[in-house]
Amino acid sequence: MTKASDLEPEDAIHRGPPVTVDRYGPGKRVNHWITASSLILLALSGLAMFHPSLFFLTGLFGGGQNTRMLHPWIGVVLFFSFYIFFFQLWKANLFTRADMGWFTGIRDVIGGHEDRLPEMGKYNAGQKVIFWAMALLIVALIITGVIIWDQYFYSYTSIETKRFAVLAHAVAAVLIICVFIVHVYAAFWTRGTFRAMTKGSVTGGWAWRHHRKWLKELAGRGRIDPAE
Ligand code: HEM
């Protein structure tokens, strides 16, 4: 699949020194942290209901009944916050030819030799896989979650459907927790990434090293402070 541009409206280069590159505006950052907090709360409340040995986690939510009442509502928050984010970012997460080079050169990614790989746009292939996995799993979780939300939707589906939904919900939840762990690990492992979601910007060096095509496109389109 090919696409015209990776640039989002707020992306811009500031000359510095040091050179910085805007990556996320305040709206996207606030929304990202709402999504992140919701997923953490969902994992904790979901695990509390998943196995008796984890029931003690209900203490964090004011007991078993409150956990059961709150969990689906937090799921609704996750769904909407993620999907606002999704529609802002999906274009930059479409796969391109260069992504093949990232997959085949995975040893160089791990070994820190990104210079041997094709230049990356705003996101690399690993980030894109995580993005689409999150999107699919969140859809699976909300659909199966609504089916088993007995308080409001009990009468709409059969017992067999609900049984299947419980299983699919648990499988999707385990998978998204794994995806979440990889995402957070990558955010810390790639030094200098975290500030993209706190300050909203990265250093010019970070952009040059990890997302050179994106940086060059920004410069090429004149998204750079005017020279003094
Ligand atoms: C404590 C938890 C989390 C941390 C520390 C974290 C950190 C980050 C950081 C640093 C970035 C910027 C990466 C970049 O621009 O290259 C990012 C982007 C992103 N995060 Fe998170 N995140 C967390 C939780 C989540 C959760 C729970 C979700 C969704 C379920 C999520 C979805 C995303 C998405 C979609 C992006 C944009 C990257 C892309 O589209 O490929 N994050 N995160």
Image: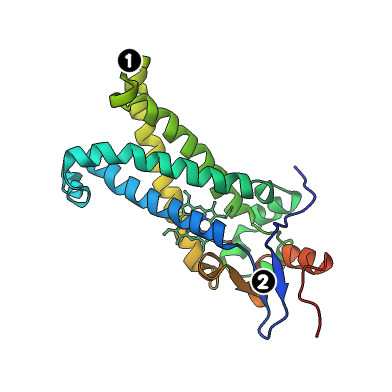
Residue 133 visible in rendering: no
Q: On the picture, is 26 further left or further right than 69?
A: right
Q: Name the residue: 23% across, 42% down.
A: 67
Q: Quadrant of the N terminus?
A: top right
Q: Name the residue: 37% across, 31% down.
A: 145
- Is tag 2's residue or tag 1's residue first in the polypeptide sequence? 2
Callout 1 secondary element? helix
Residue that mark 2 sits on: 21
Q: Amino acid at mark 1?
A: Ser
Q: Residue 144 shows which numbered tag?
A: none
Say if disc 2 is inside 8 Å of ligand 1: no
Q: Amino acid at mark 2?
A: Val
Q: Name the residue: 55% across, 73% down.
A: 192
Callout 2 secondary element? strand
Circle 1 crowding by C-alpha within 10 Å: few under 14, some 14–19, many from 20: few
Q: Position of residue 120 (x, y in %)?
A: 70, 60
Front-lying residue, 90 or 101: 90
